[in-house]
């Protein structure tokens, strides 16, 4: 057997702490002035920013939990708690989006006076906060999928907040109050798209689907192409957490193997497919005739 327990990840604790603190404060400010300005767009953006605060917390938790050592009861550690948190996050975000949409529809039916200036000022502050937070994760986004997710969330937030700012500008110069609830509904669609993707991916990971960034047929072909390997069967690939992938398989190697053979396969699977935890069983012949060798996905 060969196991890879390398979970190296640069510590972005300070960046996460700053990002979470700034965005939490801004969500509170945006909610307050959203009610003061009677702006559905500000309230919707506050909901969007709140969802990304949750996302930052989950990403930070994933890094922290990944460092915890497994125990006799939890032999893989508690990595999958991040998946459970992601599922709960997705459900909460969808419910919040429904409330925001309801408020916007009410404002279509009963238009209210909106302060375009106040909307612009609050949105401008948000643009600075979101852009600054995104830059905290810019460097790490190139080599760490977890950090990249945090960066993309905050970059998207900056884009949505820019839209709110432009909406406030349009309201100021046109006086068209329907622009605000219309913009709110657009933001709701963005939130729902993001939340549905989060929920869908979380459920797939929870039921041990092959991670979407890995082509299992390519992995099987790679293993079959290794010199000395005649068969590959019982190949399983699943997510141990939102950032780590595991693999187990049986390889039929009639001529036997040296220890270096296992080490080389482990390193190549890590480098080519970013699989971090690998278990290999080597057999000299395919003895169990009740099972057929793995043939790839149908």
Image (cartoon, helix red, strand yellow):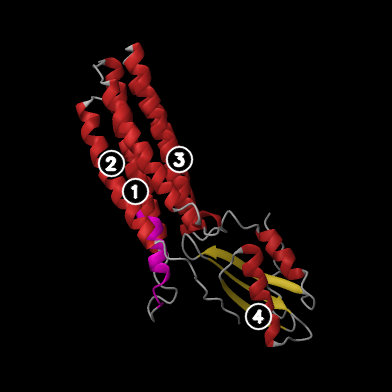
**Whole-Å distance between the Cαs marked 1 and 4?**
40 Å
Q: Earlier in the sequence, mark 3 or mark 2?
A: 2
Residue toward you, 243 or 161: 161
Q: Of the residues under marks 2 and 4, which one precedes in the sequence?
A: 2
Q: Nearer the viewer, mark 2 or mark 4?
A: 2
Residue under label 1, please give it. Answer: 53
Q: Is residue 261 above or below residue 151?
A: below
- Describe the element under mark 2 as helix, strand or loop: helix
Which of the pair 21/235 is nearer the observer? Answer: 21
Estimate the spatial distance between the alpha carbons at disc 2 and disc 1, rounded to whole Å. 9 Å
Residue 178 visible somewhere in the drawing: no
Q: Residue 101, how many percent across, how many down?
A: 33, 29
| Residue 232 falls in image quadrant | bottom right
Q: Position of residue 39 (x, y in %)?
A: 27, 25
Q: Quadrant of residue 48?
A: top left
C-alpha separation, residue under disc 2 versus residue under disc 4 = 49 Å
Please report the bounds of the magenta region as a residue range.
57-70
* Residue 263: assigned label: 4
- The mark that comes first in sequence, 2 or 1, is 2
Name the disc covering residue 156, or none: 3
Q: Nearer the viewer, residue 129 or 99?
A: 129
**Circle 4 sits in a helix, a strand or a loop, which is it?**
helix
Find the distance from the CA under tag 3 to the CA under tag 4: 41 Å
Q: How many residues crowd mark 2 within 10 Å: few (<14), some (14–19), many (20+)?
A: many
Q: Residue at x 41, y 40 (%)?
A: 157
- In the rendered structure, the answer to whether residue 260 lies left or right of residue 122 reads right
Secondary structure type for disc 3: helix
Question: Which residue is label 2 attached to?
Answer: 27
């Amino acid at each position: 057997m060969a196991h890879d327990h390398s979970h190296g990840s640069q510590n972005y604790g300070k960046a996460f702490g700053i990002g979470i603190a700034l965005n939490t404060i801004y969500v509170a400010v945006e909610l307050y002035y959203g009610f003061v300005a009677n702006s559905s767009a500000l309230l919707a953006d506050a909901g969007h920013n709140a969802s990304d605060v949750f996302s930052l917390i989950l990403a930070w938790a994933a890094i922290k939990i990944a460092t915890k050592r497994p125990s006799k009861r939890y032999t893989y550690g508690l990595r999958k708690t991040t998946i459970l948190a992601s599922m709960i996050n997705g459900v909460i975000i969808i419910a919040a989006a429904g409330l925001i949409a309801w408020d916007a529809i009410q404002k279509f039916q009963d238009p209210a006076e909106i302060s375009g200036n106040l909307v612009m000022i609050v949105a401008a502050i948000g643009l600075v906060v979101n852009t600054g937070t995104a830059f905290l994760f810019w460097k790490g986004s190139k080599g760490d999928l977890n950090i990249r997710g945090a960066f993309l969330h905050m970059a998207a937030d900056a884009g949505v907040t820019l839209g709110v700012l432009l909406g406030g500008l349009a309201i100021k110069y046109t006086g068209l109050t329907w622009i605000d609830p219309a913009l709110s509904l657009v933001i709701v669609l963005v939130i729902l798209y993001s939340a549905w993707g989060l929920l869908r991916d979380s459920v797939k990971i929870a039921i041990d689907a092959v991670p979407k960034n890995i082509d299992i047929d390519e992995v099987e072909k790679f293993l079959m192409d290794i010199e000395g390997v005649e068969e590959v069967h019982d190949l399983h690939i699943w997510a141990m957490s939102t950032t780590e992938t595991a693999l187990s398989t049986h390889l039929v190697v009639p001529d036997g193997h040296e220890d270096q053979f296992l080490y080389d396969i482990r390193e190549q699977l890590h480098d080519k497919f970013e699989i971090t935890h690998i278990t290999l069983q080597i057999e000299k012949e395919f003895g169990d005739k009740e099972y057929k060798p793995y043939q790839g996905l149908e």
